[in-house]
Image (spheres, helix red, strand yellow):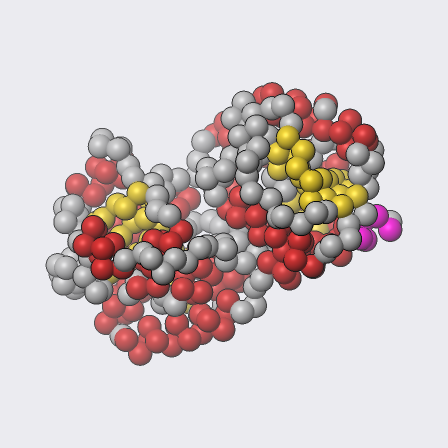
Amino acid sequence: MRIGLNLLYLLPGVVGGTETYAAGLLHGLAQIDKQNEYFVFVNREAAEWPLPGASNFHRVICPVQALNRPRRYLFEQLHLPFLARSLKLQVLHSLGYVTPMLLPCKALVSVLDLVYDYPGSFARRQLLKLFAGMSTRRADSILTISENSKAQIRERLHVPLQKITVTYLAPKIRKVSPNINWAGIKKRFNLGDVYLLALSSFSPSKNIPRLLEAVALLEKELPENIKLVLAGHVPSKGAPLFKMVESLDLGKRVVFTGYLPDEELVLLLRNATVFIFPSLYEGFGIPVLEAMAAGAPVACSHAASLPEVAGDAALLFDPLAIDEIALSICRLVKEPALRAELVRKGYQNVARFSWQTTAEQTLRVYETLIRS
């Protein structure tokens, strides 16, 4: 088979879960498939993005930038079909929600979620809604990453169930270095042996303001030296998240680390007393699996796909109920037996997911499309 992989959306280090998906799937395919030829279409920003080293994977650098969305969409719709024809592709798999409307081969599109239904930029939501709708109607088959997302695609985009296949994801493949000094990281962020960990984000769907309110509720319950570590986005002074930390008098309690290299984030996860994931919406929820794989007890939202991914290995809460978030945190801090039980169940739960399985399921969809 001659298979195209459309990664024209990819901005390394920026697009988050869709980059993790692309990297995991490609390396999974390289692990299980040495026969079929894969042509990976990347933009200029991703010209050096690491592909599998297998000889059957070929990089095709396209003269377009992902940051220039109008030009990228134009190239995707008008030029990518010609490339597909010249390379004699049998399937083009577009991993980022959008597929060309006119293709000389079978079209497969991955729609990971319908995040446009949730808080965020109105213009971006409407653009996603338009392209996701067009692409799901045009595509011969659709991949998504949870049963929850499959149900939403069917209901909101009116797609027949038989057209949609669920391929679960897996934890991000992170480097672990023996040279990273945990004592140095603790000192840098002034952490004790007990701390809470969450992922910082300015996106309203990630629900960080309610997490801050929950921690403020626990001010008298938690010892002063227990910090809430927020890894990732650091709000600028005057930004809503920064103002909220000040207004709740959490300046001494909250630590913004900024974006960390994989080696340091793994250690923060491994040593966290509680990992909290309060998201209002997730198509899948890879961070929950990453925390479990690192051995962190997890408290997470019961919204969208998260119960499906977490199974019985997390303490679930209503992300809209600040008192429930606070109670979950308090229980895990004060109940070591519960933490130990969730760590044990977490390791068992993570074993359900692997990029090799994702690749095997995806390859079967390619084969089915070509036979049809």
Q: Judge by depth and name the residue closer to the eye, 91 or 220.
A: 91
State left or right for residue 69 relative to residue 347: right
Residue 270 position by quadrant: bottom left
Residue 334 position by quadrant: bottom left
Residue extending farthest to the bottom is 337
Question: Is residue 187 at all visible to an observer of this figure?
Answer: yes
Q: Is residue 136 above or below residue 284?
A: above
Whether 309 is among the magenta residues is no
Q: Judge by depth and name the residue closer to the eye, 83 or 73.
A: 83
State left or right for residue 276 relative to residue 138: left
Indicate the position of residue 60 as horizontal and vertical percent values.
67, 33
Q: Please give the name of the residue rendered at 48% of the width and 64% of the height, measured from the top-left corner.
A: 310
Q: Please give the name of the residue rendered at 72% of the width and 31% of the height, measured from the top-left corner.
A: 100
Residue 247 position by quadrant: top left
Question: What kind of secondary structure does the magenta stretch mostly adopt?
Answer: helix
Q: Please give the name of the residue rendered at 72% of the width and 56% of the height, measured from the top-left corner.
A: 33
Q: Is residue 241 above or below residue 267?
A: above
Question: Is residue 318 at all visible to an observer of this figure?
Answer: no
Residues in magenta? 367-371
Q: Please give the name of the residue rendered at 26% of the width and 33% of the height, measured from the top-left corner.
A: 236
Indicate the position of residue 330 as horizontal and vertical percent values.
25, 66
Q: Judge by depth and name the residue closer to the eye, 342 or 24.
A: 24
Indicate the position of residue 244 as horizontal and vertical percent values.
22, 41
State left or right for residue 158 relative to residue 230: right
Residue extending farthest to the right is 371
Indicate the position of residue 20 as horizontal and vertical percent values.
52, 48
Number of marks: 0
